[in-house]
Amino acid sequence: MAGEPQRSDGVTARMAMAGRRFHAWWEGYAFDEALEREDVALRLGAVTAGPSVEAEIAEWIWGVGRHEPGDPAFTMRLARTLGLATKARVTVLGAGGGAVMRDLRSGTKWKVSGLGRAAHRVAGLDLRSYDEAMARLNKGFADGALCFFELHRDADPAAFGRFASELVKPGAPATFIDFAVARKGVRLKSCFAGPWPGAPRVAGDYVRALKDAGFTVADTADETRAFLPLIARGWAHWKRAYDAATRTASARLRAERLRALSDYAQLWAERYDALRSGQLQALRIQARKMAG
């Protein structure tokens, strides 16, 4: 109301914490101060949302900032396919927690920006969500693009391709790395269970989708042999991830993390077997936005 003194965020937060502490005592459950303090801060807008449980587990396995198997050498292997000038502007789609962007900043002099499905902020990186990008779409700003494992997540890969094409200049190169099935009719639904509506397709389907989106496709290549060791090395960190989950103070969050970790292990075990058997491949697609 007009004329009333405004409480500071600090006072409001202390009042909220006191109320939650009393409620825990009244209802007879354990009060987890760290979790409650974080939730209060989020509701007051004092901090941005952290990574989801799934993203946390991915980073325990693959490394800080990685939501898929990878390392700097693999990132640079793909970056070199763009053939860009020293000070190019490059956008990364499927940027995850920012590790790929850090790889590029260390290995190149490019100006790198990133987009991902989550809105988690990473200090020092120009990383935004797709929703944020759509609200203020900076059309044609990038000299090139790298896309990590996003086409298979979309029910309409051509629609995602059109979004990617809006971000790059006419004639700009784009490299896509994604999961593809070896032939039509291969059923790998359990390998890709999750919230996304899409599923891996054969290489030809991706090529047609990108052509419909305004790209020409110069080449496709099977990167499975380079990708498999990244999975194997990541799973050497399983014990670290399990220990981190079991050390969670909140019983509810601990159970959620352990359940998610079990599901994640099953999913990647099936993907690894499918990749080794040839039913699935890590496919690299070299494309270029049509000029004019």
Image: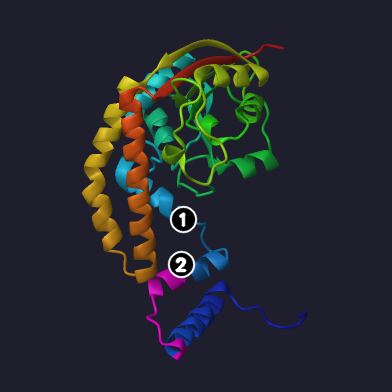
Residue 226, by quadrant, is: top left
Three-letter code, disc 1: Gly
Crowding at dot 2, Cα within 10 Å, few <14 / some 14-19 / many 20+, comes out as some
Q: For the residue labelled by badge 1, is the local secondary structure a helix, a strand or a loop? A: loop
* Residue 48 seen by the camera: yes
Q: Nearer the viewer, residue 259 or 146?
A: 259
Q: From this viewpoint, which residue is outermost toward the right?
A: 2
State yes or no: discs 2 and 1 in contact (Cβ < 8 Å).
yes
Does the rendering let one see residue 73? Answer: no
State the colouring used for the structure image.
rainbow
**Mark 1 lies on residue:** 50
Q: Is residue 270 left or right of residue 151?
A: left
In the figure, 142 relative to 204: above or below?
below
What residue lies at 41% left-to-right and 21% top-to-bottom? Answer: 78
Picture residue at 34% right of the left edge, 64% below the top: 254
Magenta-tinted stretch = 26-37
Q: Pick the residue in front: 208 or 87.
A: 208
- Left or right: residue 249 compared with residue 283: left
Compare residues 277 and 79 and report the one nearer the observer.
277
* Chain-order first, disc 2 or disc 1: 2
Q: Position of residue 39 (x, y in %)?
A: 49, 68
Three-letter code for the amino acid on which mark 2 is drawn: Glu
Residue at the extreme front: 185
Assess disc 1: are there few (<14), some (14-19) or many (≥20) residues with their C-alpha within 10 Å of its C-alpha: some
Indicate the quadrant containing the C terminus: top left, top right, bottom left or bottom right.
top right
Report x, y in % for residue 13. 52, 76
* Residue shown at the point (47%, 31%) measured from the top left: 149
Cα separation, mark 2 vs mark 1, equals: 10 Å
Where is residue 136? Give x, y as percent.
69, 40
Q: Quadrant of residue 245?
A: bottom left
Q: Specify whether residue 148 is painted magenta.
A: no
Find disc 2 in the rendering and name its residue: 38
